[in-house]
Image (spheres, rainbow, N blue to C red):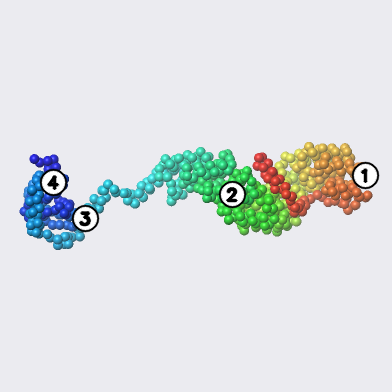
Amino acid sequence: MPTKQQKKSPNSIPLILLPTYLLFFFSSNLRLLHLDQKSVCFHLQSMKIISYNRIINPSFLLINHELPSNTFPRPQLISTSAPSISSFNKRKKDLMMRLPCRFATRAALSSSVKTDTYGKSRKEKSSSFYTHPSLLEMKNERAANRARVYEFLRGIGIVPDELDGLELPVTVEVMRERVDFLHKLGLTIEDINNYPLVLGCSVKKNMIPVLDYLGKLGVRKSTLTDFLRQYPQVLHASVVVDLAPVVTYLQGMDIKPNDIPRVLEKYPEVLGFKLEGTMSTSVAYLVGIGVARREIGGVLTRYPEILGMRVGRVIKPFVEYLEILGIPRLAVARLIEKHPHILGFGLQERIKPNIKSLLQFHVRETALPSVIAQYPEILGIDMEAKLPSQEEFLNSIIESTREDFGRVVEKMPQIISLSKAPVVKHVDFLRGCGFSSEQVREMVVGCPQVLALNLDIMKQSFEYFKTTMARPLEDLVAFPAFFTYGLESTIKPRHEMIAEKGLKCSLAWLLNCSDEKFDQRMSYDVIDMEEMEVGESSFDMNTLLEHRNDESASDYDEDYSEDDNV
């Protein structure tokens, strides 16, 4: 009785792969005996073998045969007993001797047949269960993923042109997570477009560890957005390798731990500098020109941008130019200690043009060192706009000349930045005291500080001058600096001393000296006429060259804290 397998067998078989050690051939009738656990034997009748192709695998023999459809009946499944198998084995040897094996035909096969055979083999392998995607397929898949990410970025307004070659998330969902996280930090689409490489930072691996570290240092959340806008590259940094060594170096520069976050907030780019590069050379040069080592911490706290300045391109040319103008190198060092930000004024772009403008407005070249020492900010102000307007304004209220304006700038360079309303109030006060317009002009040119003093204190000093000292107004015209001295600390005590002795002296002889010098004068029996001719008060460059005491560093830091709070 035929089985199901017998019914499903095909009528013709073009290609057969059989194990070579189980293949036996017969001249008229070919019987294929395959021994398995059930000892089942297949009997194929009227099969004619045409040729052999080749051996694909050592354990298989490939047979190409041509089977007439009219002579190929259905195969019959014949169950055999053990004796029949033994009988077949006995006859197998004789039959194999009579088999016409044509091995030569295999060598004579055409190249087209071989090519077809290899092609079929490759096709079979490609359909294997263990097949992996090819490199081309993987490349195409990556390109498709990146295209979807780019499409998402363009849809929200981000230009991804600079992201080629950068490793990006393979899914839109991960990229959306990064963009949303940057938005929570306060960064806008415009900020991201300014530095699109920030999209290559992983939220968990890069951004969160860096932000946690900055928070532990004390960087305020309110400043974090501006921090990242100035230096978004920090999100790429490694806390251990990049950030922590820089913080340790700053602490070694005598920057107090509490000031470290303020330094980073002012100049976040410092986190990207190499320790043995620009930072160390700029500090070494400042110490070399006379900046006190104990002052370095305060200098860097106020103006950390110094750490990124190149000595040969920025700091050294600045120092040498001020020396050419007549300021001693040690005085330059003192200016840097007090006003380190002046190093940030561009030498070619701002400082030199400003010096040229001052000379054009009748400031004498010999007075330039005094002008800069009194008001270092003048090096960074836009003088082309300020000088003409201030000169015209001063001329309108006191009828000054261009030469007068030059003298005023020499004695009080802050006049360039002084607002107009206070100046008008001070001029009106002087006129209200009884001074003529010419006397007011003379007083302003002789001591421009009268335009910027506290009006209430000036009123008290003038009242004492008029009632107690009972001096003529001409004494104030000759020495308008009288208003710059403290009434209780200087004017009253000294006036009482000379009144007790019955001495007659000028206001300049009375006030324009130190307390020690005044005590010496009080020991004189007569007043030296040469000392009576005391000149106008002016800035003394030697004050910058005086030795600083040990408390200067602490005072400096306190000043910084007050300025920062304001």
As drawn, is 80 to the left or to the right of 432?
Answer: left
The residue under the point 88% across, 49% down is 521
Q: Amino acid at mark 4?
A: Ser
Q: CA distance from mark 4 to mark 2?
A: 85 Å
Upstream in sequence: badge 4 or badge 2 = 4
Upstream in sequence: badge 2 or badge 3 = 3
The residue under the point 84% across, 47% down is 515
Label 2: few (<14), some (14–19) or many (≥20) C-alpha neighbours in 10 Å: few
Q: Kindly identify which residue carries mark 2.
A: 248
Q: Residue 288's image quarter?
A: bottom right
In depth, the one of 412 and 237 nearer the eye is 237
Q: Kindly identify which residue carries mark 3.
A: 57
Is mark 3 in CB contact (under 8 Å) with mark 4?
Answer: no
Label 4: few (<14), some (14–19) or many (≥20) C-alpha neighbours in 10 Å: few
Upstream in sequence: badge 3 or badge 4 = 4
Label 3: few (<14), some (14–19) or many (≥20) C-alpha neighbours in 10 Å: few
Q: Image quadrant for the C terminus?
A: top right
The mark lying in front, picked from 3 and 4, is: 4
The residue under the point 68% across, 47% down is 386
Is mark 1 in CB contact (under 8 Å) with mark 3?
Answer: no
In depth, the one of 540 and 440 nearer the eye is 540
Q: CA distance from mark 1 to mark 3?
A: 132 Å
Q: Kindly identify which residue carries mark 1.
A: 501
